[in-house]
Image (cartoon, rainbow, N blue to C red):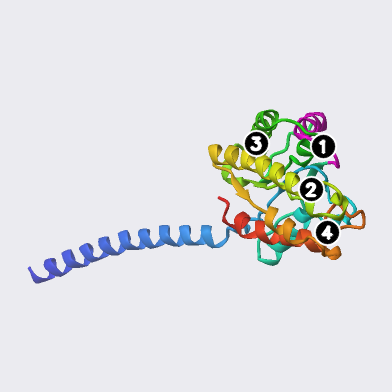
Amino acid sequence: MRSQTIAKSIRTGLGVSARGLSTIRRLCAVWFLFSCTTMEPSAPHTFSMLSLGDSYTIGESVDPKDRWSVQLAGMLRNGGIDVADPDIIARTGWTTDELQAAIRASGNTKTYDYVSLLIGVNNQYRGQSLEKYRTEFRQLLQTAITFAKGNTGRVFVLSIPDWGRSAFARGRDREQIAREIDAFNAVAKDECGKVGVVFVDITPVSRAAEGDASQFADDGLHYSGKHMKGWAELALPVVKSLK
């Protein structure tokens, strides 16, 4: 009787050991499979940017590296955000409708992580109506949003600088220029608020530059790289917060 009990126990023990061994083998096979699989690290994402505008965006009379949006991209990189230098669609003298026409003519169908817009000074300079500006600015906002993959949170607008404080404006009614610039900026800010686009007010900085030649380009009208660095610094925390 005792020998039969012992034999049964041995057979039972062997049965448990066989199942355990099978489980161990399967676990080892899984471990071997994963240990032999090389996981490729994902490539870091380089953010893209598009800047739309006029002479203030193209950086009339300054070196390309001193353009405000190029300086902004550099500041973002210095802060650990990998951003390529921006694509730019801008030209001196453009109004809102001329910028929109140029965008269409460019055939640019790319999308971007960040899109900036700074436009309107030539609408004011040519005496165009606020109603016309509102309509065309609204259209440009939608164009910018489309470039930003439909994400309003990746679009930001800079206000129109006050050129009335430049040497070029000597002999002109600077107070009237200021009132008109403020009116155009109020329209732009209002339209931005309607669609949830951030509005960066750089106009006070442009007014503070009055009388300081280092803040202006050699033409006495447009701004120097030194001055536009201030615009980039104002835009920097805004862009960092964009989602």
Question: Which type of secondary structure does the marked residue at label 1 adopt?
Answer: loop
Whether label 2 touches label 4, CB < 8 Å = no
Q: Provide the residue designation for mark 4.
A: 66
Question: Which type of secondary structure does the marked residue at label 2 adopt?
Answer: helix
* 11 or 169: nearer the viewer: 169
- x and y, in percent, of residue 131 in the image: 66, 29
Magenta stretch: give its range: 91-106
| Horizontal relation, residue 210 to residue 115: left or right | right
In primary-sequence order, the first of circles 1 and 3 is 1
* Type of amino acid under label 4: Asp
Q: Provide the residue designation for mark 3.
A: 141
From the viewer's perspective, is the residue at label 1 or at label 3 nearer? 1
* Type of amino acid under label 2: Thr
| Horizontal relation, residue 56 to residue 8: left or right | right
- x and y, in percent, of residue 241 in the image: 57, 56
**Residue at the image position 80 percent from the left and 48 percent from the top:** 56
